[in-house]
Image (tube, rainbow, N blue to C red):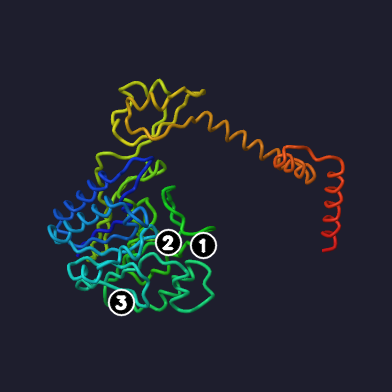
């Protein structure tokens, strides 16, 4: 049996006040056409269906249209979980009724993972999970990160090895090499990272959350990535979706063809004003200007040629600011404690410390020094 793995649709995404919904629609229906041509009748969506907890009506309408076409016209069974961008309550609505028509939605953490059985293959549906949810489920206090939470949860699951077992989940798994600025961090300080070895019992793990297509530790544990680019640090990512064959657990990627995408170019203002410099002018664009001075009203002039120019930056000025910041850090590193205190006070108050205040500072520093010598 073959199935397709996608994730991170982010329906309703708006970038610099431009809606990407029409491109998202193109890609979703290109996907359905591909699946129909390949006679693939199972679609897995690993979370972040919407871009916001409360999606726009247009985004809801697109999902409704897409799922209706998939189920009714293409006879594709859809298995879907919620991600960290999704509202569990909204996505779960009418899921019991829809399951009978081939749409399986899981948005809540349950004591035993729900699965959908297709012949000798079981698809386990595990939506985005927070440590607090696992703590409440098992009434324990000693859980401090996602690793501990998922380890405890999976230790309570009964996975029958006589089946080919597929896990669909939405987490930050392993030390994935490529992240994007359009992804919302799940936590602070790396506590969201889950070791890939937790999923050794599964033959394939369909991940969502990271937008770059990539494997984690093995070919059959991977992020499908988003269907399109959602930030300018993703311009070098070749977007695709995953086709999995459960007969031999082989994996292949299929690339999509959006009519518009995000692109970033580097050049001078004069080069960009040449109509022949860039051929695809309808893309969503970011320009890095190499000019060494600011061009008055540059973005307004450039938008005459490039209607979807979203941002411009000056690489020379940025490099100068970075150099100045580095020099400032080097200067601070060479300052003694008293000088640092003086600088801090001046930066906050915009006045120098007077002699009486400096005497108080010196007395305090000496006292701290004496106390440290006693340890």
> At 28% across and 31% down in the image, what residue appears?
280
What is the number of callouts on the image? 3
Q: Position of residue 98 (x, y in %)?
A: 21, 67
Asked where in the image residue 263 lies, by quadrant, the reply is top left
Sequence-wise, the earlier of marks 1 and 2 is 2
Q: Residue furthest front?
A: 57
Q: Which residue is mark 2?
A: 173
Q: Which residue is mark 3?
A: 161
Asked whether 132 or 125 is in front, the reply is: 132
Location of residue 4 with respect to 151 vertically, above or below: above
Q: Position of residue 95 (x, y in %)?
A: 25, 68
Numbered disc 3: secondary structure: loop
Which disc, if any, is residue 64?
A: none
Q: Which residue is mark 1?
A: 191
> At 36% across and 34% down in the image, what residue appears?
285
> At 48% across and 79% down in the image, what residue appears?
139
Numbered disc 1: secondary structure: loop
Sequence-wise, the earlier of marks 2 and 3 is 3
């Amino acid at each position: 049996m073959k199935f397709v793995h996608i994730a991170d649709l982010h329906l309703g995404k708006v970038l610099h006040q431009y809606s990407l919904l029409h491109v998202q629609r193109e890609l979703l229906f290109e996907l359905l056409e591909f699946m129909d041509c390949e006679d693939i009748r199972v679609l897995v969506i690993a979370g972040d269906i919407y871009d916001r907890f409360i999606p726009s009506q247009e985004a809801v309408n697109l999902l409704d249209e897409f799922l209706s076409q998939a189920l009714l016209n293409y006879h594709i069974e859809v298995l879907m979980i919620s991600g960290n961008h999704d509202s569990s309550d909204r996505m779960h609505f009418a899921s019991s009724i829809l399951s009978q028509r081939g749409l399986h939605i899981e948005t809540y953490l349950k004591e035993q993972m729900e699965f959908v059985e297709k012949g000798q293959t079981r698809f386990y549906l595990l939506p985005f999970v927070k440590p607090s949810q696992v703590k409440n489920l098992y009434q324990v206090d000693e859980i401090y990160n996602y690793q501990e939470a998922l380890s405890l949860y999976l230790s309570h699951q009964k996975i029958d090895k006589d089946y080919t077992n597929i896990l669909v989940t939405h987490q930050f798994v392993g030390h994935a090499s490529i992240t994007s600025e359009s992804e919302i961090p799940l936590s602070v300080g790396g506590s969201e990272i889950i070791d890939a070895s937790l999923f050794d019992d599964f033959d394939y793990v369909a991940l969502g959350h990271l937008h770059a297509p990539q494997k984690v530790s093995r070919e059959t544990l991977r992020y499908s990535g988003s269907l399109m680019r959602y930030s300018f640090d993703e311009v070098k990512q070749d977007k695709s979706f995953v086709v999995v064959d459960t007969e031999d657990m082989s994996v292949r990627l299929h690339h999509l063809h959006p009519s518009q995408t995000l692109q970033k170019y580097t050049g001078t203002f004069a080069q960009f004003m040449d109509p022949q410099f860039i051929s695809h002018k309808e893309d969503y664009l970011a320009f890095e200007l190499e000019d060494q001075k600011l061009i008055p009203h540059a973005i307004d002039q450039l938008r005459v040629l490039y209607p979807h120019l979203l941002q411009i930056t000056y690489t020379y000025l940025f490099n100068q600011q970075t150099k100045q910041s580095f020099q400032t850090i080097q200067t601070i590193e060479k300052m003694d404690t008293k000088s640092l205190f003086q600088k801090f006070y001046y930066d906050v108050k915009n006045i120098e410390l007077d002699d009486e205040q400096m005497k108080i500072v010196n007395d305090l520093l000496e006292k701290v020094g004496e106390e440290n010598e006693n340890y």
